[in-house]
Image: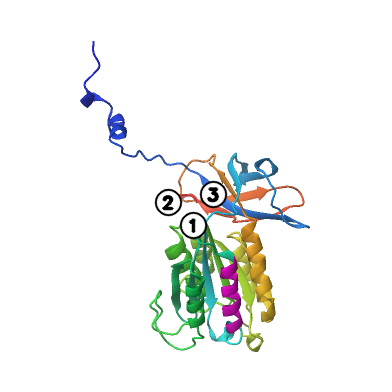
Amino acid sequence: MGPPPASSAPKQEQELQEGQTIRVRVNLVNTYFSARDKGGFLTGLHKDDCGLTENKEPQTIKNFTQEKSLPLTIGILLDTSGSQMNVLPLEQESGVTFLKDVLTSKDEAFLISFDINVDLLADYTSSTSELRRAMNKAQINTGAGTGSITGNATPKGTLLYDAVYLATHEKLHDEAGRKVIVMLTDGGDQGSQVKLKEAIEAAQKANTIIYVILISDSHFIGQYMGFNPSYDMDKLATETGGRVINIGHDAKRLDAAFAQISDELRTQYLVSYTPKNPNFDGTFRNIAITCGKDVKVQARKGYYALADSNTE
């Protein structure tokens, strides 16, 4: 009996013969982290040096690499509310120096200012000269206006959490590779539509690391009576795998703060695993990474197991 006619071949085989792609979902969770001990950041770790748990259940690490050359996308969020009036020029200068030092031809950055509005000053670019021009356009805004992103028409205060949400949900969510936000602010939010929890959730869903350089104008110290901005900023940063660098009102420490972030970006690792829990149920899964007794690991606290997006 001869072979069956070609038309009766399985549909999958026909599609392959026609050069079509069969998509298979791979539930792979990617998490970036840095590790340090008393001597500084560690650059020689291997897969066997570290362990990982999801909701306290040990997971099998599939990939473990040091990400020195993976493309980097950076969002600079610049607080341009009245409380930053006397430190803004130094922030602009140090921010440009940082981008010039960190960005390579395959990296990109964008710039957002936030005050009573949230404005996109520079869209994705690898040009430091373009970023410099955009950075120099930033100016203190305490009056009414309409933001190019939010469209707010009435003054509300300082839309810090809105800026984080828009940067992560609108700009970074669908980007691949390493995604980082560096925010320069005194940490005060006034009038955002989203809350701190929603801003953190948006960053976690976009797998974006947030660093906060906490800087304040000495003339505005005490303006947030009964409120501790550093607590909320610490939560925003640590939950996403970043940290707060508090330089107070000493703007001369800005360059050193940026240098610390640059060093961390050069020593990051990428760890990947397939969760033992295969369900895309939308729940938040806690991640914990350990690399030895005296090693401090800095990584996002977890991810959302969503069916309609990857788990990057």
**Residue farthest along the top direction in this orientation:** 1
**Residues at discs 2 and 3 in contact (Cβ within 8 Å):** no
Q: Give the foreground label among 2 and 3.
A: 3
What amino acid does circle 2 point to?
Ser
Label 3: few (<14), some or many (≥20) within 10 Å?
A: some
Compute the Cα span from label 2 to label 3. 13 Å
The range drawn in magenta is 89-101
**Image-based side of 32 in relation to 14, left or right:** right
Label 2: few (<14), some or many (≥20) within 10 Å?
A: few
Compute the Cα span from label 3 to label 1. 12 Å
Does 34 sit above or below residue 234? above
The mark that comes first in sequence, 2 or 3, is 3
Assess whether residue 146 is covered by the magenta stretch. no
Res 143 seen here: yes
Label 1 sits on residue: 205
Secondary structure character of the magenta stretch overall: helix
Percent position of residue 75, x then y: 51, 67
Label 3 sits on residue: 30
